Amino acid sequence: MQESTANKREQLISVPAVILLGVVIVMLLVLLFPRKGTFEDQRYIKNPDQLSIAYLKTILKLQPDNIPLRLTLAQQYIAISKWQQAKQLIDNFNFQNANDKVLADIINLQAHTIQYASTKKDDPARFKILAKTRDILARMDISHFNPAQLQTLAKIALSLNRPAIAANIYQQLASQDVKNPAKWWALAGKWARASSQNKLARLYYLNAYKASADKKTAAKYAGLSVITTIEANQQQLAVESLNEYLRVFPDNKYFLESIVAAYKALGDLQKAAHWNRLLWKSQGQNNEKIILNQIELE
């Protein structure tokens, strides 16, 4: 009888059973107390589902001061357009770390943007929601934003019809992204121009020209800088820029045509005629056609 009891006891605490119990305990610890950095994983944010949200909610109840977890859950709610739940997680919560505060500010803006987009067009509150959302956007300090966050913010600015703010965000991006600044300078120029800031657009396109890696792209941005200079009624500056560009692109038809038109606008027909001759020669025209064109110019 005693031997039978001993055998049963041995079976209850067998090695496989101990291993299995250990594995279960480890899994529970991992689930309930995940390692630091787990919730910054983009898989939690980009692929939200009800199961992952339920899991994050459960862990947050156990760890209410876990800020990465709180922010990840809020981002998941944003991803599925549940802006109220996202706001509840960040409202009145003290984010002391600068990076956490930046992310919380973005989530707050995204929540208001979703709220505005989901409000019916005939709802009297729609205009007030839009005004508040735009105000939040305008007051954001973007100096601590990383490139990915700046791109998100620029898209939101454009969705709210705030091209001037988008232009400012893109110029900030250009100063951060050393690998491809020309792209961001050009977008800054595009949206500065869209907001009728032609002088600023010219500077942005000029920076895009200087930062361009190939000659074809450089010529494109140089041309846009000329267009915005003329749109800003700065004919003399346009002439100076065109003289510079024609040293780099001597046969560029657009630059040649533009400098002829610019000198004509300034009343300097002698220089206009000089560049007009070069224009026609660059196009392979004979002397007879050049003379006829010269008569039209005068």
Image: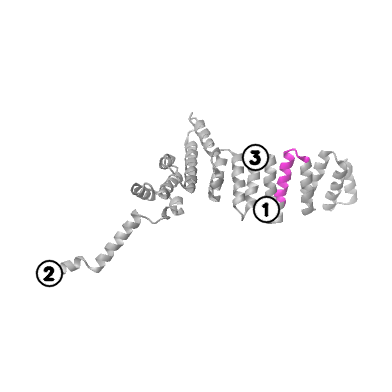
Q: Which residues are magenta?
A: 219-235
Q: Please state which of residues 207 and 118 is positioned toward the viewer in this rendering.
A: 207
Q: Amino acid at mark 3?
A: Ala
- Location of the N terminus (image quadrant): bottom left
> Dot 3 corresponds to which residue?
194
Does residue 45 appear left or right of residue 15 in this picture? Answer: right
Asked whether residue 224 is drawn in magenta, I would say yes
Tag 2–tag 3 contact (CB < 8 Å):
no
Closer to us: mark 1 or mark 2? 1
Q: Please state which of residues 244 and 282 is positioned toward the viewer in this rendering.
A: 244
> Dot 1 corresponds to which residue?
211
Residue 38 appears at what percent x and percent y? 41, 55
Q: Is residue 76 above or below residue 3?
A: above
Name the magenta segment's main secondary structure.
Answer: helix
The circle drawn on residue 4 is 2
Q: Amino acid at mark 1?
A: Ala
Q: CA distance from mark 1 to mark 2?
A: 85 Å
Secondary structure found at label 2: helix
Q: Of the residues under marks 3 and 1, which one precedes in the sequence?
A: 3
Closer to us: mark 3 or mark 1? 1
Residue 205 appears at what percent x and percent y? 68, 47
